[in-house]
Amino acid sequence: MQQKNYSGLATHERIIKHVNSGTTVHGTMGCTADVLYCCCALLTVAFIGWIVVAVKYACVVPFRASVDEASLARLALTAPGGNGTLPAASLAYDLALVVSLRRNSRAVVGVLSRAAPLDAELRFLGRPFARARLAGAGCGPAIRYLGKTMVYRLAWKGESATPAPRPNEVAAFARESAAGVFELQLVVAGEFKCTVRSRWYRIRVSCALRLSVSTTAAPAPIARVECAS
């Protein structure tokens, strides 16, 4: 009577169990790797989102500036003399501006107060020729509400020495003087502190102005000009 080889069958069963066991372990490791990959991806997305929000709120300008009124009575350029009597050019000016600064950002929560002086500067062809201090540090009431507007009325009259203008600058001034319309730039800069977040906000806005020479008999009003930050 032939005997059946049970030992070989048992060995074959052990091999199958070993292979199945190894397959199960490999599948568990793959699932764990997928979970770790998903977690890392989510953390990366969350970190990038946090950076975007932080940059947005850190760079926000809580004010909008505009020039509501402007009048130019005089703008005259005197070139340096050839005999050395006038070593530098001079720019004579007489103009008035009404500048508004309005709190418009909802991202900044809290009371805003001036942490540094608020200054204005007038430029022609990129060169500053007149400056004025709108408000000193800590001066004036705090800015509490959205839509709060501060109005500054500026009157500039005088004469300032400037470096000798280049030929292209002299030609540009002559061209604008002949047309009776001058292109000027107003720059307003300052710094505010938010009492709730203890954060400082620096503002620097630029207003491009096209002003016609006005006279008492024929004033030349301008439309409201929005300034760019």
Image: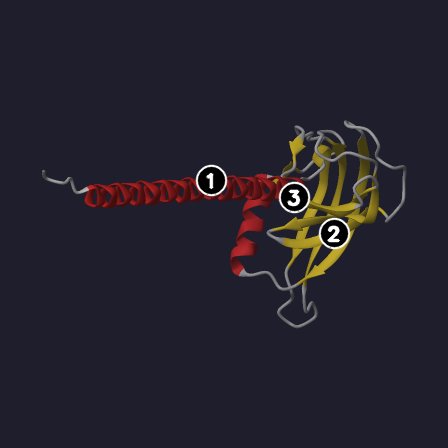
Q: Residue at x 64, y 45 (%)?
A: 185
Q: Quadrant of residue 97?
A: top right
Of all residues shown, which one is farthest toward the left?
A: 1
Of all residues shown, which one is farthest toward the front?
A: 1
Q: Nearer the viewer, mark 3 or mark 1?
A: 1
The residue identified by callout 2 is: 130
Estimate the spatial distance between the alpha carbons at disc 3 and disc 1, rounded to whole Å. 36 Å
Q: Is residue 6 above or below residue 172?
A: above
The residue identified by callout 1 is: 35
Q: Position of residue 137 (x, y in %)?
A: 86, 49
Mark 3–mark 1 contact, CB under 8 Å? no
Amino acid of disc 1: Val
Nearest to the observer: residue 137 or residue 220: 137
Nearest to the observer: residue 103 or residue 109: 109
Estimate the spatial distance between the alpha carbons at disc 2 and disc 1, rounded to whole Å. 64 Å
- Is any atom of residue 113 visible in this view? yes
Estimate the spatial distance between the alpha carbons at disc 2 and disc 3, rounded to whole Å. 28 Å
Q: How is the image coloured?
A: secondary structure
Amino acid of disc 2: Ala
Q: Is residue 99 left or right of residue 11?
A: right
Q: Secondary structure at mark 3?
A: loop
The quadrant of the picture occupied by the C terminus is top right
- Mark sitting earlier along the chain (3/1): 1
The residue identified by callout 3 is: 59
